[in-house]
Image (tube, rainbow, N blue to C red):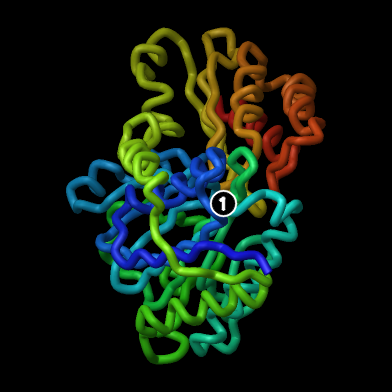
Amino acid sequence: SDKWRLIWAPALDGPDIVAYTMTAVEGKLLGVSPNTFLLSGFSKYSISIGRYQDLDLAIDYERAKEKDIDVVRRPIGGGVILIDPVGSRGLGLTVDRDFFPKLDDAFRKVGEAITEGYKKLGVRNAWYKFAGDVMVGDRKITGFGFTEIEKTVVMQCIISLKDLDFKYFSDVVQLHPEKLRDKRIKDLSELMTSVEAETGRLPSNGEFKKAFVESFQNVLGIELEEGGILDAEREIYQKWRGYATSPENRFAFSSMARFPKLKDLLNKGYKFVFAKNKRDRELVVHILLDPEGKIEDLMFSGDFYCRPESYLKELENSLKGVDPQNEWEVKSKVEQIFERPDWEIPLVEAEDFIKAIVEAARRV
């Protein structure tokens, strides 16, 4: 069977989370890092946002700074992840793409392994809901996603040992009222659950580690051998820790940073509109329209995953100068990207992009 490295890191902060993952990715490209399975604990309250999320729609960044909550943008898709040092544990893997040739397959196997880990901790009714959610009844206990960076597949998720301290995050995270309205629920915590809530006890770190090491070895048919960061990886690690806290990463998708001089432009007859389209994944578009009603600039964001990312930028650029009310033209630009055989964006269709743009244009 395949031998992978197991890293147990009991006290990570926000930047460490990104650094550990990206060190294994870059180390793979350089040929120094083995396939890696990372289990971690956390040293402080942190918020991890998905690669494509709009920072300003997701959280109140200034408030997070006041409360000393680490905010990092992880290099993979998905939505806001809240990390509570008491109840949250991290689980991640960085492996050769050949191990999971198909994304669907990766989702199924990892979903099964996480579900089995929870069962070992006594959560008997855990089940896997494709794609990327582990549930107990109709409550979510873990969500996960993948991204592909060069020839490496990366997955990160949070294992919920104890219910999150939602109160602490409530004035920082823009909790989606529509998510709650759908379910007619006042409090987000009623959508979530944890090992302690299901079993009445909080597992020790040793129990957590044993359960998930066994379940992943079993489902993936691998052997995990405990190790640490290699000497050859140390410099890479420091570099990524720096990157994780850098403005260019944090503001990579930020409507405020992307459209900074809005006031002046609006005075000159420009219009700024945005629309959200949510089926399985949330897709948001912000559009700046010139005085003629043509697209001056636009930004897509949301909790999706896509690859290669450069195609998303290409799509944004191809739509500049287009009249968004001209549905036919919008459609042809979007479909040009979706027709490419190597473009992948699970659970999002061309139609979702077209709808969001047309919907935004109607709001002028």
Left or right side of 36 for 335: right
Per the image, the residue denoted by label 1 is 154
Figure quadrant of the C terminus: top right
Q: Position of residue 220 (x, y in %)?
A: 67, 69
Residue at 70% across / 65% down in the picture?
Answer: 108
Relative to residue 30, is residue 107 depicted above or below?
below
Q: Position of residue 35 (x, y in %)?
A: 56, 56
Relative to residue 318, is residue 15 depicted above or below?
below
Amino acid on which the number 1 mark rests in the picture = Val
Q: Position of residue 274 (x, y in %)?
A: 52, 32
Figure quadrant of the N terminus: bottom right
Residue at 77% across / 33% down in the picture?
Answer: 338
**Count of numbered circles in the view:** 1
Residue 288 appears in view: yes
Residue 170 appears in view: no
Q: Nearer the viewer, residue 139 or 120?
A: 120
Q: Nearer the viewer, residue 5 or 46?
A: 5
Left or right side of 65 for 53: right
> Dot 1 lies on which element?
strand
Estimate how packed mark 1 is, as few (under 14), some (14 to 19) or many (20 or more) residues with alpha carbons within 10 Å.
many
Residue at 60% across / 80% down in the picture?
Answer: 116
Left or right side of 117 for 227: left
Residue at 46% across / 70% down in the picture?
Answer: 159
Task: Give the farthest residue toward the left.
Answer: 66
Q: Position of residue 11 (x, y in %)?
A: 29, 64
